[in-house]
Image (spheres, helix red, strand yellow):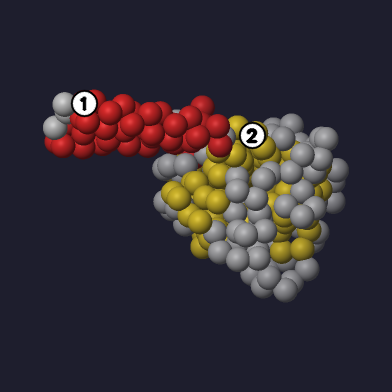
Amino acid sequence: MSLGKLRSCVHAAAAIVAALCVAPIGIAGDFEFGTMIRAGLSGNSDHELAIGTTAASPSATGQVNPYFNGSNQLFEIGYLKATNTAYVRVHQNLSPASAYSQVSFNPVGGAAAPVDAIWRLPAASFFARATDSSGVNLVSISNLTLSGVSGSLDIIQPIQSTSLLAYQLGGFAQPSVSQSQEVVFRADSGGNWKLQGSMLVLGLLSNGGVASGSEIEFGVTAIAGTPEPASAALAMLGVAGMVAFARKRSMRK
């Protein structure tokens, strides 16, 4: 075999390795939680914060206290590996030092996401909605940032839009918006991460508007997966075998 053919063989093997390393079958051990911040209803059992395996069927709910006040408020969604805790919180204002309301979730069985997990925030699950059409109401999300808690993150696919706006304004409406593509990253060295931003909700029933319950809401689902070492090992073994075979044929000639 000529040197050129040997190189072509090695290049082909490398392409196979790359394909195997990014294939879906190379990810295992999924860990998932969903969060939601919504209008709820002030002073009522109707919740404003929710978290669980899915946002639609939360394991924990709570109220924003004091209730949304018509100004920008800091929110945070994150995961802390040391305590295996996913959480969602809303501050009273934009200061991280201000008091906040929070609900937390620990997966059944206590399984924690691995430190080397690859986290995904699916585009369709990253949403803002304002669905009451009988008045003026909106939810505005801005200054979205994704960061670590005990170090920096490895951002593989960043947030495409740092702001989301859903509204019903008389005859004009944009009732639902989401991200344009999935957000992908690795957590910090401790396995932690947090998503922060500013949230403004207007048109709430308790503040003179009409919206309550889920008529104004914002949420995101986070999914963690661990690369399977067996996939990469098999791929590298295949490459080694192909290279050895090519060299042996070359020596015979």
Q: Which residue is mark 1?
A: 252
Q: Is residue 167 shown to the viewer in this render? A: no
Q: Position of residue 26 (x, y in %)?
A: 52, 32
* Helix, strand or loop for disc 1: helix
Q: In the image, which is nearer the foreground, mark 1 or mark 2?
A: 1
Using the image as rendered, state which of residue 128 and residue 239 is in the foreground: 239
Looking at the image, which residue is at 43% across and 42% down? 181
The location of residue 138, given as percent across then percent down, is 56, 50
Toward which corner of the image does residue 212 lie, by quadrant?
top right
Per the image, the residue denoted by label 2 is: 30
Judged from the image, the secondary structure of the residue bearing numbered disc 2 is strand
For badge 1, the amino acid type reads: Arg
Residue 63 pos. (x, y %)? 80, 51
Would residue 200 be found to the left or right of residue 177 on screen?
right
- Relative to residue 228, is residue 135 depicted above or below? below
Q: How many residues crowd mark 2 within 10 Å: few (<14), some (14–19), many (20+)?
A: some
Kind of residue sitting beneath label 2: Asp
Q: Quadrant of residue 35?
A: top right
Q: Residues within 10 Å of mark 1 (few under 14, many from 20)?
A: few
Q: Nearer the viewer, residue 110 or 199?
A: 110
Q: Quadrant of residue 20?
A: top left
Residue 219, placed above or below residue 196: above
- Which residue occupies 51% across, 56% down? 154
State how many labels appear. Answer: 2
